[in-house]
Amino acid sequence: MADRLVADLIVERLRAWGVGRIFGYSGDGINSFMGALRRSGEVELVQARHEESAALMAVGHAKYTGQVGVMTSTQGPGAVHLLNGLYDAKLDHVPVVAIVGQQQRTALGSEYQQEIDLQTLFKDVAAQFVHTVLTAEQAAMAVDRAFRTALATRSPCVVIVPHDVQKLPAPDGPSHEHGAMATAAEWRRPHVRPREEDLQQAAEVLGSGERVAVLAGQGVRDAGDQLRAVVDRLGAGVTTSLLGKPFWDETLPVSCGVMGHLGTSASAWLMEHCDTLLIVGSNDPWSEFYPAPGQARAVQIDLDGRHLGNRYPVEVGLTGDAAESLRALLPLLPDRSASAWRGEVEQQVRQWRELARQRSEIAADPLNPELVVRSLTPHLPRDAQVSLDVGSVVYWYARHLTLPAGVPAHLSSTLATMGSGVPYGVAAKLAHPDRPLIALCGDGAMQMNGLAELITVSRLWRDWADPRFAVLVLHNGDLAEVTWEQREMEGEPRFADSQALPDFPYAEYAGLLGLGGVRVDAPDALDDAWEQALRADRPFVIEAVVDADVPLLPPFPAGEQKLDNFRSGLEQEGEAGRHGLDLLDQQVKQERS
């Protein structure tokens, strides 16, 4: 065997791009790559329990660090399992790179064991770059292009390396001949600022409005101060996308909360009554919760010009960095800070906050999940990180959890894949082992893959400077979000065969893994449970037994339009639906008061 293989070159290239950790699961198609990782000792391999979880960890790494997340798998089933995480990265616009093995070149096309046409498999999810390395000389170029493209387009890229190519001798250096590409591990973020005339037109639109609303997405991640200045100047109200929630201060009096189906009544009011809309760094898909077309004049700022006008008919679309664009826009705007509109917005925010408190205090059997998530707010450390899974827990996070400034919170938003909460949490904790991590999950997602990845947590936690890794499991024995969707969207009753989950002792299971855990089924035990979890000397599971019948009512007026369907579904359930009907009626009464 040569002293230095293509597999070693790939690891060297990963280090050149600043990669210190990758996520994956081994297999014969990447054995040479595994050997190179072992020889290097400079790139940590985090072994997940499943390739899909490894892919989600890589996406989580990209979201929490802003760096490229890297995943690896063997060919065939391993490669197929990466798809969910790759699509999560694609739809939420974060950079990841997959290094994927393949059968040796001489076997391709023969229907060999685990042979899949990987170029075709990945061509949609990695539309910006997917390439199979066929010679030793291509390897560095392929890795470099994958990283540059992932960073430049904020998208997933895939490098496929047949097993026999991994074992080839690595070139001594770049070749200087026809058809040979000499590349470098180099990319720098550009400085993107809209043209002056476009900024002036945007200011004219925003300055002409009397009732300005701002929709802030994940693109405001590094633009909080600049956005605050524009909001104050225009006397605007602010709503955020789900991805934008962690990057805006929701304690401000003009902060209306998250928009959309799982959003707040204040955000719905803001969008229904505004005459001007500024969208910053958001591509939120909830189009029915935007102002009606023609209601509001609109300006949009986005680093990716393909998003401009994608959700709402804007008059002025500005391609640029959010911070730089807002900074340039500010001196062109009139001072509307003392407008009557701002006072109206603040009143709606106060009303929503009171409504949220009332909803969390509705008696449920045994626990109201809104109260469970809301109870975390006063206990949340200011240096914490939060990860979320997908399901009804996202509604309660969006409406009830107030994040301290600087506390990141991430989830699979646009793909909305279940099973992301614990893998994201592992990635966040590995990136910042000195910060406490809180993962908010439902029991459906835990049974999907969260329980398996707690095994990963049990393997890793002793190496963390701060061992706190608190997992909240909302245990309701039901796929509650989809149950309520069956009622809301179809007017159908709950279908137990599709919705009921097997019972499982989540806190006891944590104990079997050597972790801490507590089962909670009374409101007065919640504070103590959070205190236990956040002072524990090891990861800790809070199993909160919650009521599946607490409605997932959209904010009015959209929610009001769904009431007939909700009631139709619940009434068809007979006696089993009475409790849900009662809770729904209580929420409707509160919404209308």
Image (cartoon, grey):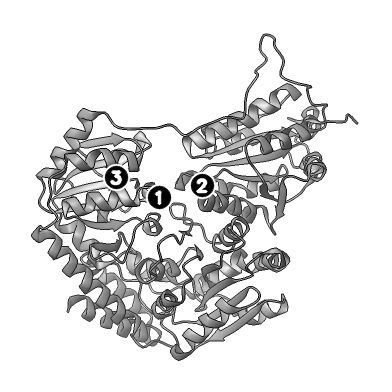
Labels 2 and 1 touching (C-beta < 8 A): yes
Residue that sits furthest to the top in the current view: 178
Query: Residue 499: percent from the left, percent from the top?
Result: 49, 72
From this view, report whether residue 144 is shown above or below residue 266: above
Circle 1 sits in a helix, a strand or a loop, which is it? loop
Residue that sits furthest to the right in the current view: 1
Q: Is residue 169 left or right of residue 86?
A: right
Spatial distance from mark 2 to mark 1, Cα to Cα?
A: 10 Å
Q: For the point 37% across and 83% down, which residue is it?
A: 577
Disc number lying in front (3 or 1): 1
Q: For the point 38% across and 79% down, which residue is it?
A: 550
Residue type beneath disc 2:
Gly
From this view, report whether residue 11 is shown above or below residue 462: above
Q: Is residue 160 left or right of residue 444?
A: right
Label ID, residue 221: 1
Disc number lying in front (2 or 3): 2
Circle 2 sits in a helix, a strand or a loop, which is it? loop
Residue labelled with disc 2: 66
Residue type beneath disc 1:
Arg
Can residue 164 be spotted in the picture?
yes
Labels 3 and 1 touching (C-beta < 8 A): no
Q: Is residue 307 left or right of residue 475?
A: left
Circle 3 sits in a helix, a strand or a loop, which is it? loop
Q: Earlier in the sequence, mark 3 or mark 1?
A: 1
Residue labelled with disc 3: 311
| Other-residue count near label 2 (Cα within 10 Å), few / some / many at <14 / 14–19 / ≥20 | few
| Other-residue count near label 1 (Cα within 10 Å), few / some / many at <14 / 14–19 / ≥20 | some
Q: Earlier in the sequence, mark 2 or mark 3?
A: 2
Residue type beneath disc 3:
Arg
